[in-house]
Image (tube, coloured by chain):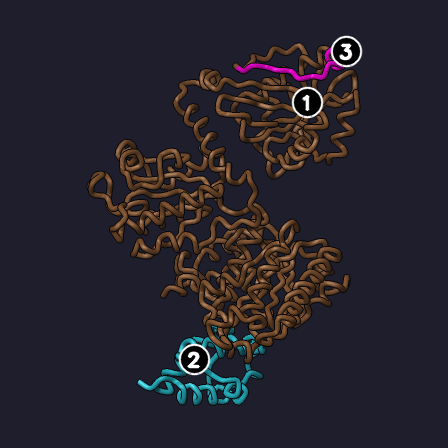
Amino acid sequence: MSSSLYTELRWLPPKPNEFPAMCKALGTSMSPGSEARALAQFGLATNDLIRLGRNLIRIGPSALAPLQPFKLGVISNALLDLMAPVLTATAARYGIALECVTADFGQTTAEALDAESVINRFRPDAVLMAIDHRGLPLRFVAGSRELHEEGVSASLQVLTTIRQGFQENAGCVCIVQTIPPPPEALFGSLDRSIPGTPRSVLEDLNGAIAKSIDGTPDILFDVASLASTVGLSTWYSPSEWNLAKLQFSEACLPLYADHVLRLIAASRGKSRRCLVLDLDNTLWGGVIGDDGLDGIKIAQGDAVGEAHLEVQQLALDLRSRGVVLAVCSKNTDEIARQPFRAHPEMRLKENHIAVFQANWDDKATNITAIADTLSLGLESVVFLDDNPVERDLVRKELPQVAVPELPDDPAHYARYLAAAGYFEAVRFLDEDRAKADMYKLNAERATIRARSTDMASYLATLDMEIIFSPFDQIGRSRISQLINKSNQFNLTTRRYSEADVAQIERDEHVFALQIRLIDKLGDNGMISVVICRPADEGDWEIDTWLMSCRVLGRGVEVMVLRELLGAAREQGVRRIVGRYIPTERNALVRDHYEKLGFSLLSRDSDGTSVWVLPVDADVTPVPMKVTRQFPAVEASR
Amino acid sequence: MSTDEIYEKLTQIFHDVFDDDSIALKPELTAADVEEWDSLNHIRLVLAVEKEFGVKFSAAHVASLKNVGDLVKLIQERAPKK
């Protein structure tokens, strides 16, 4: 039962009986991408994935919008025929339209080094290196330290050569696997301590592989840990290898594919970031409203209580690596908070929870409110609830939210949640640790907003300070990062490299500002960039105006406009011209210039609009302190 | 398990593996008769049969299979007696 949790992807709901018909219907669907994504959310076995995958391959990745395209090459010393359809179907689960090309059987090093090989010509975004001990220069001779070390270094060399080959010839990253040791021991327990045995050689090799990833763009896929989780004897099937050259048992393929896609999704920033927790019978045993503080089960020494404590501990551990925690419970707020405040055994405290949503509204509404408060998309949210009715409701209303199935026994809740791998990451940086706190600060800002009766008084409570400075060397890389990453609040979406930004810095005809915002809850850092260039008739045209969405609704754009108008007046400019160029992502600012009082000059058929404002226009300031940090030369000019 | 029962279960497996509900099983049916019956699907077929009937086939068994009739005979020999 235990390993079937993993091999059968038990955290996903079981497939409906109509699954084959639903796969077939994809071919004639108006939105096959979204439907494929929905179909892939079930716990599918290899044959189901092949059925779905073959349909998706027939439809083609370009017809699968809104799924995002990704090109994956796969090389292996084993048979890859099952791989392409299974990976393609699994990719839909992660919102990815996968195009998968597999190399011929056993083509590994040659595939990487030949610039004209199948994989290199395919120009993949990544290559999955599905290579195990049977594809590496390893000779297992018990007791031979020499062959042990030679095998480790030669194998590492082969893997490095392949990685470098793909990097040079395809310019892509590699997904590099560790190698599970075969379950057959030579001596028994002694194998681990004798050099040259498979177990000891592979342990050293796996350590070396993990180390070799550090500082490179490549991605580690710890297949050795995955295989030991399901059991090495389940993983390696001698008959399937002999009959079909399958590297590992076909029964493990759905799990393997899910892990490959977790890594690819994580590398594309698609991992989930927020864990929303139900309370009664999820975080503790019993119902706080009925059983009271003394009645709920959360203590050490009680089997049910310990099971729920493990859920709390996992949530805390996730928080310490940057996952934001929230609560969504059908309860009276005051009662729901009692255990957090007054129960000595609770590991989760109120200050760990960024958003606490306890009321009698339906959970879909509350989860939406939580995501809004945290400025996170619903596709970043995981919802943990013991109640199957609530889970179904949320899945139906909010298909973007991940809702793991849970077994009847709470002892397995934490394991199910961890097994689902929602929070997979390919890197772990210092700033990740601080993330949960940062989201909590944002949530506090949102709470203040909810309490303030009107916008102006809310803004006044924030004690904001806006800081304007010209482009400078210190700000250069952050300016360029904002220019290249801002999509939503971005009027023209013009992208400039760091070198371009340096050019703008030096050009005295161009007026450019970097803008920072501080408030009483912290320094938001650089949050906006604006660039004006001289246009006809002594006008200025706003070439670029963008802002981080973290500070939406704070009146920053109004203050930026005031600053622009002041600077323009000083330079003898008559009018400021603004341009809105629509993209798929920037509908947010379609009416930006209209809201700021500009008048429409023209509108093209593609939706581009041009706006104008005289420099003496009157703009009411928003309550915030204005600081200008201009170097002395500028000020004296 | 009766021959009919085996055929019934086997038909379901064939429909599933080849994604084709029109396949009708008879003892003389071979890989050449089913368009999609390539080496990959042959493996899937064997794996699905092993799972459904709780049997394990050796490489020698698989190599000796000539047609559906052979497969049914093999299942009858190997399936746990009940």
Measuring from the top left, give residue A193's x and y in whole percent: 52, 68
Residue shown at the point (42%, 24%) measured from the top left:
A448
Residue shown at the point (70%, 34%) measured from the top left:
A494
| Other residues around mark 3 within 10 Å, as few (<14) / some (14–19) / many (≥20) | few
| Other residues around mark 2 within 10 Å, as few (<14) / some (14–19) / many (≥20) | many
Measuring from the top left, give residue A590's x and y in whole percent: 60, 29
Measuring from the top left, give residue A140's x and y in whole percent: 60, 75
- The mark that comes first in sequence, 1 or 3, is 1
- Kindly identify which residue carries mark 2: B10
Locate residue A116 relative to residue A560 in the image: left or right. right
Chain identifier for the brown-coloured part of the image: A
Nearest the eye: A101 or A220: A220
Q: Are marks 2 and 3 in contact (CB under 8 Å)?
A: no
Q: Is residue A635 magenta?
A: yes
Residue type of the residue flagged with mark 3 = Arg
Residue type of the residue flagged with mark 1 = Leu
Q: Does dot 1 land on a helix, a strand or a loop?
A: strand
- Kindly identify which residue carries mark 3: A637
Chain of the residue that carries numbered disc 2 in the rendered image: B
**As drawn, B27 above or below A135:** below
Nearest the eye: A530 or A263: A263
Locate residue A540 relative to residue A296 in the image: left or right. right
